[in-house]
Image (cartoon, coloured by chain):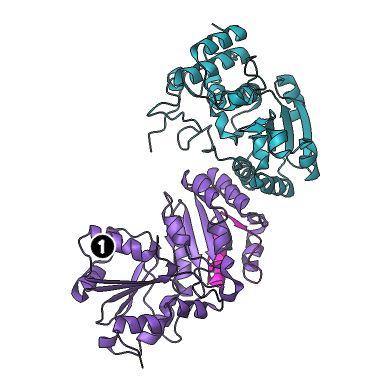
Amino acid sequence: MKEQRIPVSAAPDGNRVSASRARARLLQMHYEAGVGHIGGNLSALDAMLHLHQQVMGEDDTFVLSKGHSAGALYIALWAIGEITEEELKTFHRDDTRLAGHPVAHWHPRIAFATGSLGHGLGLAAGVALGKRLRDEGGDVYCLLSDGECEEGSTWEAVIFARHQGLTNLVILIDANGLQGFGDTGEVASLEPLASKFSGFGLNVVEIDGHSPGALDDALTQRGEGPLVVILRTTKGRGVSFMEGRMEWHYLALNAAQYTAALAELGEP
Amino acid sequence: MRNAFCAALVELHAERRFAFLTGDLGFMALEPLQRAMGDHFINAGVAEQNMVSVAAGMASGGLQSWAYSIAPFAYARPFEQIRNDVCLHDFDVKLVGNGGGYSYGVMGATHHALEDYGLMCGLQNMRVLVPAFADDVASITRQMADDPHPAYLRLGRCEKPLGMALPDYAPWRRLLSGSRGVLVVVGPGAGGVLALAATLSDEDRPDIWVATELPFTIASLPPHLLDRIRETGSLFVLEEHSAHGGAGQMLAHVLLQAGAAPSRFEHFHAHGYRSESYGSQAFHRIENGLDAASVLAAVAGRVLA
């Protein structure tokens, strides 16, 4: 194992990083590395950025179950000064720790190596139950994709989390409506998604997944067990030619697209 | 062995904190542990993938977690959770599979575990423990609890011969001496082999060794075992596990690396269900040539009287 390295530099000016600045940095990172998975990163970025910058504290744990949005996690951690600019430049290259899906053992805020879908919620439930058994404070925030709700293990974890009454667990679903090879409605429809979770006895709130204010409001609506926040999002959010288009689950940007995307974001 | 395991964990619980998860199994066996542990004993329901992920999640916060089920439901169903959630992170999670090999007998093939420790030994950071006798379980359980890394415990049914004294627990033990080569046994089948071999003359029986901790490394092999293999030139391995990934292959591998390969090597291992008929553990052992009489006859090179 490599020596653990905790970056100390803060975000560019020590203030909060704006959503458009975060988007631009995420696109730059993917463009320079020549890799895709951009669409699902852009759909999840607003919630992840807000959680890391304004919601979570030292005692809280974030679990990225949709590991293919690792880029957004790295950007959120960069925004709060937990990953350096220098480290971001290693993304997806040889000898990096910023792999295409999160890897274990190097950063205290990257709790788990994920990427195989359907693992994160069980892990998060374990963290939440462990906190309760050890009388520790703090909440656990677990972000899933909507396609990931097709995994049976996700529902095993839902049943468990509800039965254990894990009030310190918040389940966020990045419901962008598109998965790897089709529209979620065409591949394996789970809509209405909210009733699936409420049918298991969970408290469910459905919001605009790009609105920090709506997320703040949703997080106040805790019930007896875990809270589910369905984030209605747009895949490729913020870049018009990516929005709602399935191919941006996988594709990488070319130079012209990158320039056009930055111009749309109003970022240099 | 289940009762010994339960008693060992009850004792450990009195000294240290850990969590125990069961996949809704352990009726008529784990109740004392359930009573002792209170809210740290968790019936995770019939959901083994989640059980292992939860164990990993709890261990990530420093709480050692044990996850128990019938063996195939402990290692096969949640294999990816063991690989990704436990082993990639080197978390302090202990998997316990009850019913190694053909232990569950006529309950059917879905309940057998013929490839468990081969799979587990292929995972990074994972150690495997296969007690041969119920007397081993307390030492092994304590050793697992003391080592903050993943481990898999394969339990079976104790077949210790009545009235026979055994050496204290060690990863390698010689149970009986003989001159027809060295027989290494993994698992409770050692009991029946020992009982029958004790009735044979020294010339007709092999040295009988039992190995408990996997995977093997050359450094972990006792020098006396290597001496005996060298002196007799013959090595036999008996296990209720498939050939691939089994203890026989592991041992052959380290002996070849050490330049200590015997001139004769015979591996008695599980072949599955060749007759497509099902029965007790004893039935499957006989069908696979894993029963004490078949093994010792093969070693002696003649039918035993």
- Residue B255, horizontal then vertical, whole percent: 25, 62
Q: Look at 48% across and 68% down and name the residue there.
A: B138
| Residue farthest bottom in this picture | B305
Q: Look at 40% across and 67% down and name the residue there.
A: B212
Image-based side of B59 in relation to B218, left or right:
right
Q: Quadrant of residue A18?
A: top right
Q: Residues within 10 Å of mark 1 (few under 14, many from 20)?
A: some
Apparent colour of chain B:
purple
Residue pointed to by mark 1: B255
Q: Is residue B193 visible?
A: yes
Tag 1 secondary structure: helix
Residue situated in front as seen by the camera: B189 or B165: B189
Residue A203 in the image: above or below residue B54: above
Q: Quadrant of residue A26?
A: top right
Apparent colour of chain A:
cyan
Q: Amino acid at mark 1?
A: Leu
Residues shaded magenta: B1-28
Image-based side of B112 in relation to A149, left or right:
left
